[in-house]
Image: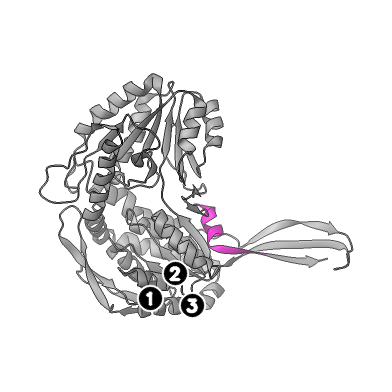
Amino acid sequence: MSDTYQLLIGGESVVAAGGYDVVNPATEEVVGTAPDASVQQAQDACRAAKDAQKAWAATSMEERCALLARYAEVWDAHKDELVPLVQAETGATMRVAKTMQVPQVSARFRRYAQVESNLIGVPPAVMPTTALAPGGIVGGVQHRAPVGVVAALAAYNFPVTNMAGKVAPALAMGNTVVIKPPTQDPLATIRMAELFSEAGFPPGVVNVVSASTVEAAEAITTSPDVDMISFTGSTGVGCRIAEVAGKQMKRLLLELGGKGAAIVFDDADLKTVVSNVSSTWTFHSGQICTSPTRIVVQRGVYDELVGKLAGMAPHLKVGDPMERDTVIGPVITGTHRDRVEGLIESARADGATLAAGGERPDLDRGFYVNPTLVVDATNDMTIAREEVFGPVITVIPFDDEDEAIAISNDSPYGLYDYVFTADTGRAMAVAKQLEAGNVGINTLQRNHEMAFGGFKYSGVGRDGGAWGLYAYSELQSIMWAG
């Protein structure tokens, strides 16, 4: 791996105003030095994207999509370099890095390399004569036009995968982009941007600005050269972006926090429940916004489910993500570990019981948290209200269906909820009453062609599949009489 990285502005590698160390969360060793851009450099990147946008939009979709397909090939050719880099800076287990991080980038670029018409046909309408115009048959099409310059800011848990889901559809629709990688693990995303030149993209179409300061980030989100902001991350930052962007009427796509509720009825297959909800522990140390972190369990199976989960937790190996039998690696930083531990302590203080975990693993280095099971909880506790983003499951009992729905909806978030029951008719009826953008029935599996996004403080807008093309375009109605 390189130990120095640069900004990419207008097709040129640019030495940043400063730099900062990126730390491996498993070893606490320095992975590399990230460029720390100045406000002026952030503004320069936005201007470069603006200068390149008209020519890129004038390029046919066929040509743009061919370059996306070429990029997927280039990315795959560099996978042996990229997997260890992504693993080192994110702390993901090697299995996650090899299967869910790096290969998903090329998969997303190939998805949006499929050429689709920018025109949507509309049936003609017979319109009467009015004071505005003579009557007649009015035809029309709806044209998906590019938004312009898109600022893409991704989350630290899946930095390159998340960024690919933004950049690929944005480019396909004729937008240029300014990439702002997550501060904690920006290096692979910087490398992602560099590879666009190797794939043959014109200068300025893709720019990357890494920065650790709020000032540099806000220079991007407030730039008059930026037309749209696509952000994945915390609700607090998302609200700030919405505040500053609203003053300039920028288009927004915000995928924010989650506090997913998994409703478990007493007729559910508990083996299926355990294998699914335990992903909060076993998948990237619980650093997933779609995790079922609140398990809302009917009292008839409450004790049995708690017993199964409590019995499972001690057998999940916490430690070096490079070792094949490791299940739970570190969380991203020491500061974040402190926050997770503070929330666990708040559960104790609020009167909940820890049926598993709660103590720090006995490891010499790294930012580790043991899988923790909070029981005897109520939905008004801090642990049930705030997004933990770590390997912590909170279990809350309920008596009847209405209570389960009320508990699940009693949250500022609404990203992803789940329903587990043998009665699929009841599952569908309950799903429709949940205030969440996504609901899984007896599964955590995703369908990536479905619209993805949240209700309430979980965000604004939808992407995924063809919805991603809509997200990064403006719908223009074009009409004629004939």
Mark 2 touching mark 1, by CB under 8 A?
A: no
**Which callout, 3 or 1, points to the residue nearer the camera?**
1
Residue 421 in picture, x, y percent from top left? 46, 26
Membership of 470 in magenta stretch? yes
Label 1 amino acid? Ala
Residue at the spot of label 3: 50
Residue at 32% across, 53% down: 157
Circle on res. 3: none
Residue at the spot of label 1: 42
Residue 370 in picture, x, y percent from top left? 21, 40
Residue at 28% across, 79% down: 17
Span of residues in magenta: 462-476
Label 2 amino acid? Thr
Is the residue marked by circle 2 packed among few (<14), some (14-19), or many (20+) residues within 10 Å?
Answer: many
Label 3 amino acid? Lys
Q: Quadrant of residue 432?
A: top right
Membership of 463 in magenta stretch? yes
Q: Earlier in the sequence, mark 3 or mark 2?
A: 3
Is the residue marked by circle 3 packed among few (<14), some (14-19), or many (20+) residues within 10 Å?
Answer: many
Q: Is residue 236 above or below residue 378?
A: below
